[in-house]
Image (tube, rainbow, N blue to C red):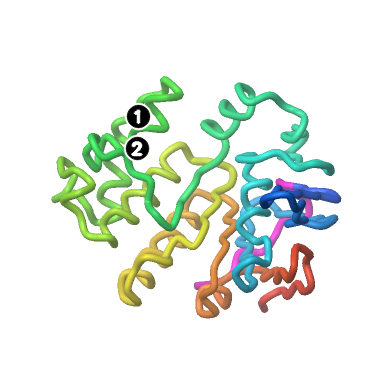
Amino acid sequence: MTATVSSNKALLTAANLNKTVQVGEQSLAIIKDVSIHVDAGEFVVIMGKSGSGKSTLLGLLAALDYPDSGSVKLGEQTLSALGEDALAAIRQREMGFVFQSFHLLPTLTVAENIAFPLDIARRPDQVRVDELIEAVGLGHRRDSLPNQLSGGEQQRTAVARALVSRPKIVFADEPTGNLDEQNADQVMQLLLDLRQQTGSALVVVTHDPALAEMADRVITMHDGVINGSKVNG
């Protein structure tokens, strides 16, 4: 797939992030003075060994956690300065999320899971839901529950749910980690195709070098700091 050229204006900007966690009686610095930006429409991959801090960084960028110091801005909004209610509203309206473990609601059908972000925001759009169900190839599964789906089908449902609100940015944490190679390739191609159609920026934590090759930019982490950044041609 052709890489999307980044815009000159950053959509997401993080400056001097620090995050420490308590492990028993010991304080462990997970993120150390990290600064990063993501342009509108850009596809950024974050790589690094287990324990390098990449998933913690993703959580900070996605406003799922607060940094101990530093700031995260989406557009002109400083997320790290907002309360949880305000952050929840921004996440619903402007962000999408795809996780390794799918995080589908077990009592909702495929169609209902995809529609869930719109229902929470009280912005129902059945046409959009139907469009995405067909785009992810699950028209025959629309009334199925998650436990009736394969892993690949569950993740395709999660991808559709992440994009149903036409978010400005989608965060994905090891989105293919629980899938076999064929399903992993299918899910990532689907995510990239839908991202290209919607213009959403995409930030993905992954161990997969093949996925990294598809990105506009690859950021490498080690021991809580960024130790490399490469722009793909």
Give the answer, above or below, for where 194 lies relative to 78. Answer: below
Which residue, as the protein is rendered here, is positioned at the far front?
25
Residue displayed at 51% across by 75% down = 208
Left or right, 36 with reference to 167: right
Above or below residue 204? Residue 227 is: below
Q: CA distance from mark 2 to mark 1?
A: 5 Å
Side (left or right) of 9 relative to 153: right
Identify which residue is drawn at 24% across, 43% down.
110
The kind of residue tagged 2 is Arg
Q: Along the horizontal axis of the image, is 183 left or right of 18?
A: left
Query: Can you give x and y, in whole percent of width and height, for residue 84 in the image?
Result: 63, 26
**Which residue is depicted at the point 50% across and 44% down?**
96
Frontmost residue, 25 versus 72: 25
Residue in front for this viewpoint, 25 or 114: 25
- x then y, percent, for residue 102: 37, 51
Q: Which residues are magenta?
A: 1-12
Percent position of residue 122, x then y: 41, 20
Amino acid carrying label 1: it is Asp
Q: Magenta segment: does it hold 147? A: no
Q: What quarter of the picture does the C terminus occupy?
A: bottom right
Question: Magenta span: helix, strand or loop, mainly?
Answer: loop
**Residue beneath disc 2:** 128
Judging by the rendered image, the residue that carries numbered circle 1 is: 125
The location of residue 65, given as percent across then percent down, is 65, 40
Label 2 secondary element = helix
Q: Are marks 2 and 1 in contact (CB under 8 Å)?
A: yes
Question: In the image, is residue 174 above or below residue 76?
Answer: below
Q: Quadrant of residue 50?
A: bottom right
